[in-house]
Image (tube, helix red, strand yellow):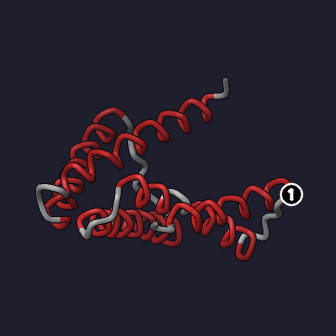
Amino acid sequence: MPIWLTFAILALVFWGITGVTQKLATNRITSERSFLWFCWAMVALSAVVLLFHHAGWKLATPVLIAAIAGGALNGLGAWTSFRALESGGKASIVISLISLYPLLTVVLAVTFLHEHLTLTQTAGALTAIAAAILISLEG
């Protein structure tokens, strides 16, 4: 198995468990407090990474801006997911919907990075959109 696939599967497991832990937290504390604890966990993990990996600090400005923007957008995504859960969203629906963010990535990659989708990939994206619509319907 390629190493990238191993990491992708680990991310899937971590984020799958995260959906449940976020809902458990927002059932008992505010989304803001839950988000702040999320941030503290990220700071602690960042410290561990710094201990074991020499970070190259000399980055070109566009790379630094992209990295900071990625972190900020990730944080905003986490905070709004906490808000969705705190506002009464079911974890099974909220997490499923927000986990479709790669569809936006696909659209942006095709538009700005000039990437191309195969017919099979396009069918998969359309199926994911249909799934999002179906899973968000409440009885």
Vertical placement of 95 versus 52: above or below?
Answer: below
Left or right: 102 as drawn, with respect to 32? right
Q: Residue at x 79, y 70 (%)?
A: 114
- Residue at 22 percent across and 47 percent down: it is 41
Residue sitting farthest toward the top = 1
Q: Nearer the viewer, residue 120 or 106?
A: 120
Q: Position of residue 59 (x, y in %)?
A: 47, 61
Residue sitting at the far bottom: 111
Q: Based on the displayed image, in which of its 4 quarters is residue 85 positioned?
A: bottom left
Residue 116 image position (x, y, % from top left) = 83, 63
Q: Position of residue 127 (x, y in %)?
A: 71, 59
Q: Toward the viewer: 133 or 85?
A: 133
Q: Residue placed farthest to the right in the image?
A: 119
Could you tell me residue 75's position as x and y percent? 34, 64
- Determine the residue positioned at 27% across, 52% down: 22
Q: Is residue 106 left or right of residue 90?
A: right
Numbered marks: total: 1
Residue 130 quadrant: bottom right
- Residue at (58, 64) in percent of width and height: 134
Amino acid type of the residue tagged 1 in the rendering: Thr
Judge from the rendering whether residue 50 lies leftward or rightward of residue 63; answer left or right: left
The quadrant in which the N terminus is found is: top right
Q: Which element is circle 1 on?
A: loop
Front residue (pair 132, 54): 132
Q: Is residue 40 above or below residue 14?
A: below
Q: Which residue is mark 1?
A: 118
Q: Where 11 falls versus 24 (above or below)?
A: above
Q: Residue 110 occupies which quadrant of the picture?
A: bottom right
